Image (cartoon, rainbow, N blue to C red):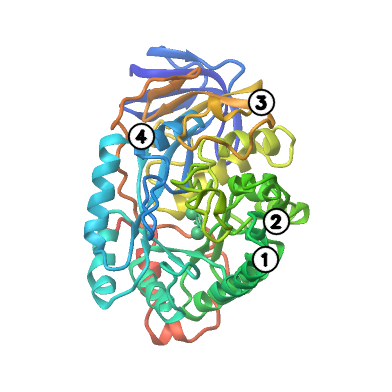
Amino acid sequence: MRYDLTIRNGRVTTSTTTVQTDIGIIDGKIAAIGPDLAPGVQDIDASGRWVMPGGIDSHVHIEQASSTGVMCADDFYSGSVSAAFGGTTTVIPFAAQHRGHRVPDVIADYSRRAREKAVVDYGFHLILSEVTPEMLAQDLPRAIADGITSFKVYMTYDALKIEDYHLLEVMEAAGREGAMLMIHAENHDVIRWVARRLLDKGLTAPKFHGVAHDPLAETEASARAISLSRLLDVPVLLVHISGPEAIHLIRGAQRLGSKVHAESCPQYLFLTAEDMDRDGLDGAMFCCSPPARDADAQEAVWQGFLDGTLQLYSSDHAPFRFDTSGKLPKGDATTFKEMANGVPGLELRLPLLFSEGVLTGRITPEQFVQLTATNHARMYGLEHCKGDIAVGLDADIVLWDPSVKRTIRWDDLHDNVGYTPYEGREITGWPETVLSRGRVVVDRGELLAERGQGQYVARRCPTPILDGAMRPNPSAASRWLDLRGKAWKSYGEPCQ
Ligand code: DUC
Ligand code: ZN
Ligand code: ZN
């Protein structure tokens, strides 16, 4: 057997183990793992390098138009290039359905744009901003059959928020069809009420974004989302969790046997509310929803990752420039309520956790792999092809130089945002060589991928990580509504 490519003598970390070994690749897939493999057509010497699966970033906003027409600063080219340089070889951005738009048209539009530009593999989640009978009966099953096996809904934002009744309807559809429901859990009226009073007092600076999005808004909405999920016994995923109270609630619900999964992001490990408190409007560069909190909250997020309460570490890359196109629609007169919400993080997601988590010993290399790749593959139906280093999976592989020291500068990054909230931070370790399906896409700072070479990956139904191990919840609703059996049959299977 002649390998197309071998990676030799690397320190290979999978989701379960670390060994010094070789990897053989044929036709873009991992064909063998073991010592002293026969030479390939091409051989990469990985001595001194840590070899890990390419990251999967399952929460990114790329070339996404907001409900008010604000367009993300990254298109599918700059976003995916930035991903590749940061060691992420699969992205799952959102196709956003805004009110009055038809789901099939939205999916066709995003698919066309991504196909022409992406340099790494991609799938889509569908954002639903309104819920109609036609959508539930036809559009969602059709989207799932086409490999879009997850939906995101919002409990806040005027133009996106759906009411609890509709949240239950989408949850029921997700349970019936075996899809994953992602929920942005913040109490809309708490944010609205506090923001109104702050603005009335003339308190308009970016730091008041953190005040308006009080942690209790997240706590309350998370509790509500958990209760609805338990009522129907349908797995859900609470995205971008920021606060200790929400984490505490999620942990408690999991102990009761509910399948409430959760995600957090670099901004909740490495930023705090103080970052929003800067001269002029500079703090806007650090504003995201929910906002970063404080040192105790950072600690709670670390703990959540360590004990499995939080399964996913994603970037929530929300790229908006620090100008009138994004953060400052009204220039110097922009209030915290008017700026685009979100921070960039696609390229730095892995290097930050590698440096501050793995190399400091806070998490193991295997936990790093689980949090950045394997768990995403399971939760979003990519397990059959991505998320680990194993024979038969796509050869999406990153060679890390664990010794290199870098000072983060936006000038060295590849997104189109114009700043990074992590500017000036010192980190150790960097993804030096990145392979996507066996092709080197980045090597020592050079891009070797072509526009459009990334492939759409039709995802299967997710395998919820918390499924099976837990007691079924006592709710009768799921039984009387005949949900449970259907959901469990389709989870993890091809959806077509
Ligand atoms: N929600 C997200 O998921 N991302 C960016 C901003 C937001 O509110
Ligand atoms: Zn969100
Ligand atoms: Zn987001």
Q: CA distance from mark 4 to mark 1?
A: 35 Å
- Mark 4: amino acid: Tyr
Q: Which residue is mark 2?
A: 293
Residue under the image location 54 percent in, 17 percent down:
46
Instruction: Look at 60% across and 52% down and name the residue there.
Output: 287
Amino acid type shown at disc 2: Arg
Residue toward you, 347 or 334 = 334
Q: Quadrant of the C terminus?
A: bottom left
Question: Callout 3: few (<14), some (14-19), or many (20+) C-alpha neighbours within 10 Å?
Answer: few
* Pointer 1 residue: 215
Q: CA distance from mark 1 to mark 3?
A: 32 Å
Please tell me which of labels 1 and 2 falls first in the chain. Answer: 1
Q: Which residue is mark 4?
A: 77
Q: Is residue 262 above or below residue 190?
A: above
Per the image, label 4 sits on a secondary structure element best described as helix
Q: Please state the horizontal and vertical placement of residue 344, each as a whole percent of the image.
A: 53, 42
